Image (tube, helix red, strand yellow):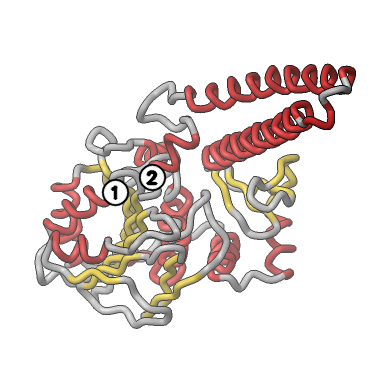
Amino acid sequence: MKERIFVIGASLSGINALSRLVGLLPANFPSPVFITQHVGAHSPGLLPQILSNAGRLTALHPKDTEGIEPGRIYVAPPDRHMLVQRGRIRLSHGPHENHTRPAIDPLFRSAAIAYGPAVVGVVLTGQLDDGTAGLLAVKDRGGTTVVQEPSEATAASMPRSALAHVQVDHCCKLAEMAELFIRLANDDPQPPEQANLDELIEIENRIAEGIFDLQDWWKLEGMSVPCGLNCPVCKSALYELHDKRMMRFRCRAGHAFSAESLLAEQADSRETQLSALFGSLTEEATLAKRLRDAPVYKERVDLTRSLSGKIQGIERESAQVCEWLRALTDLVEPDPDGGLYTSESGFRAGQL
């Protein structure tokens, strides 16, 4: 009995790529398709309508515990991880992964656990590397891995990361990918040759599902080492996972980062702190100016001179902070399609 499932992850320009891909699938496509597209928490959730209009298959935001039907496209709703269980879908408010919810890795891991070699994992256009760890899980469980040809992707970082870390089965353009989908959907999956890191995959899946407990943490702690860094979200200690194929981190609250997403989050945190410092300096200078100019202090030359000096000093400090903030926005990728990039103009642009 054929029971293929397709799980797809996309970020920057993913809506265009997904529309093209689903538009090439036939009305009698027999397998369910699960899509995580990076969207903001307050997105209006129009992607199912867009995809339904783009092709012949019905796309929808599923409800929690909804049963899986063949030939449907299930789209992760805003601010929820979409997880696959055997025969049904779970929606979770679990910790952000790679600074986003919904994230691609939780979908891929859950599908790999539930359906093993029947899973076809697909990484499309996007910044950074969400989806790479999940694609490794699909590969570990014997599933088929597919990556969009980087030269076709608007943002090649996610496809390139997947190709660098995973022994990908197929790398192709969207038109070829649709033909591949049809062929795979009508072919019985092969049994897996091996399954690695099962316990780690399962623990990470429980974290995404929001049922992480102390026993899980103690096990995860044994599979990782303190890295001397703090989580930029909750400030608790970060642990580096024992997975030599890809540098990944988790904190005790469950927030997960690849090395690149952690670097981007640290850059965002630095910008936030610098902006707060600039605001604090502005408030201090504003109050000092009000005191200096107040009529009651006009006769106190020593005080007004001191306040004027203070204001000048703050002006110099705020100018320096402004220069640091400008330097942050001037950072650019050494390779526009590579991995490292300015945080605000890069990853944020993927939050469609």
Q: Secondary structure at mark 1?
A: helix
Q: Is residue 237 above or below residue 347?
A: below
Residue in the picture at 44% in, 69% down? 83
| Residue type pointed to by label 1 | Gly
Question: How many marks on residues?
Answer: 2
At horizontal 73% and vertical 51% (from top left) the residue drawn is 236
Residue 10 falls left or right of residue 204? left
Can residue 160 be seen from the camera position used here? yes
Mark 2 residue element: helix
Real-space Cα separation, disc 1 to disc 2, in angstroms = 8 Å
User: Whole-percent x and y of residue 179?
Assistant: 13, 54
Establish if 26 lies above or below 245: below
Relative image position of residue 213 (x, y in whole percent): 69, 71
Classify residue 42 as left or right of residue 67: right
- Which amino acid type is marked by label 2? Gly
Query: Which image quadrant is residue 64 in?
Result: bottom left
Image quadrant assignment for residue 144: bottom left
* Residues packed near mark 1 inside 10 Å, few (<14), some (14 to 19) or many (20 plus): many
Residue 226 versus residue 49 in the image, above or below: above
Q: Which residue: 67% across, 32% down? A: 282
- Pick whichever, 105 or 54, lies toward us: 54
User: Which quarter of the rendered picture does the N terminus lie within?
Assistant: bottom left
Contact check, label 1 and label 2, Cβ < 8 Å: yes
> Label 2 belongs to which residue?
350
* Residue 346 percent location from the top left of the image: 43, 36
Instruction: Give whichever of 275, 9 is nearer the camera.
Output: 275
The residue to which callout 1 is attached is: 14
Residue 58, position in %: x, y? Answer: 19, 71
